[in-house]
Image (spheres, grey):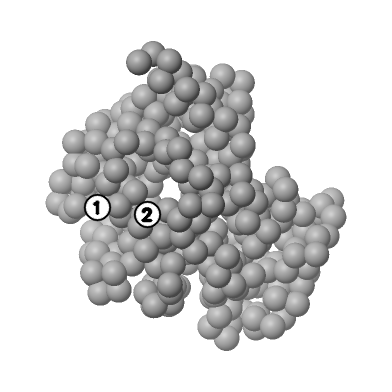
Amino acid sequence: MTNQSVTDGRPPLKDFLADPSWQFAVVAHRGAWHGAPENSIEAVELAISNGYEFVEIDVQATADGELVCLHDDTLDRMTGQSGIVSQSKVDDITCLFLKEGAGGEAAPFSLSRPPLLRDLLAVTGDRIYVDVDVKHFRDLEKVAAFVKHHPSRHHINLKTVVESEADMRFVDELEQRTGVLVKPIVQVTAETLGIYLGFLQQRSTPLVEGLFDSWSSFELYAKAAQSSGTNLFLNSLDEVPSAEVTDTQSLADPDLGWGRLVEQGVRLIQTDRPNALKEYSLKRSADALTEH
């Protein structure tokens, strides 16, 4: 890991990904939501102050074409109100209050409101990398067009699920046309492994997110990613585990959880427990210095 102060500006994302000096980076899923509502400006600011390298946020378009940072298609979990994001006008969403943490029926309300993408990015600057999860493929063009002209564009990547060669061609063309880094998310199974290994061989990309059905598929893909110079991004989220590693397992024994991923060359780990993962990264760095 880097020893960079959280007050220092971070280098452009592509330069960071090309730097072999750091071992792995912490990606705070939906921001530091244990201390603020998920996807809120406050959750992002907390992620910055805690020194995480990346914050992941969710984005989708409203009925009137604005980009709002909400994960669910519906409003109820995080705002307690009914409605569908894509069928609601932005003013009817941003006037609501977000529930604390990950929301839900029992969660209390906060003083935070659902942020627009432009307002959230206004606080990130070059202080943290932003992993923008475009919830719907239909919104990818709109989000890329916005990020293309944003002052923080060199510290942002978009991501979307890629299921076919046509999807991959669209992602490649969009990236070349806008200059915005678009990270493909690939769902690797025993049946699709060959297809996605082929993608690695056919195109050069600095960053790929993988969802793996088994450890064996993960090992084969991770080896190929390392050989092609591709940084591999994995989830350890309990709800969406990759390669059999979860946050809960990792909290019980970090070396048998997150450590197993790092040993296979994973350089970006998305987690709902960023504080614990950050502590683990610092411990590994300290142990490595002691060994040398």
Please indicate, yes or no, whether residue 165 appears anywhere in the rendered image: yes
226 or 238: nearer the viewer: 226
Question: Quadrant of the rendered structure where residue 90 is?
Answer: bottom right
Q: Please tell me which residue is depicted at 35% across the width and 57% down the height of the picture.
A: 12
Picture coordinates of residue 170, whole percent (x, y): 27, 68
- Specify few, some or many for label 2: CA neighbours under 10 Å numbering under 14, 14-19, or 20 or more: some
The vertical placement of 65 against 192, above or below, is below
131 or 199: nearer the viewer: 131
240 or 262: nearer the viewer: 262
Nearer the viewer's eye, disc 2 or disc 1? 2
Q: Please tell me which residue is depicted at 68% across the width and 68% down the height of the picture.
A: 114
Quadrant location of the C terminus in the rendered image: top left
Amino acid beneath label 1: Thr
232 or 130: nearer the viewer: 130
Please indicate, yes or no, whether residue 193 appears anywhere in the rendered image: no
User: Which residue is farthest bottom?
Assistant: 64
Picture coordinates of residue 221, whole percent (x, y): 28, 36
Relative to 85, is 174 on the left or the right? left
Q: Determine the secondary structure under disc 2.
A: loop
Quadrant location of the N terminus in the rendered image: top left
| Residue at numbered disc 1 | 205
- Specify few, some or many for label 1: CA neighbours under 10 Å numbering under 14, 14-19, or 20 or more: some
Relative to 139, is 196 on the left or the right? left
Relative to 173, is 188 on the left or the right? right
The vertical placement of 286 against 88, above or below, is above
Numbered label attached to residue 11: 2
Q: Determine the secondary structure under disc 1.
A: loop
Q: Earlier in the sequence, mark 2 or mark 1?
A: 2
Q: Please tell me which residue is depicted at 37% across the width and 54% down the height of the picture.
A: 11
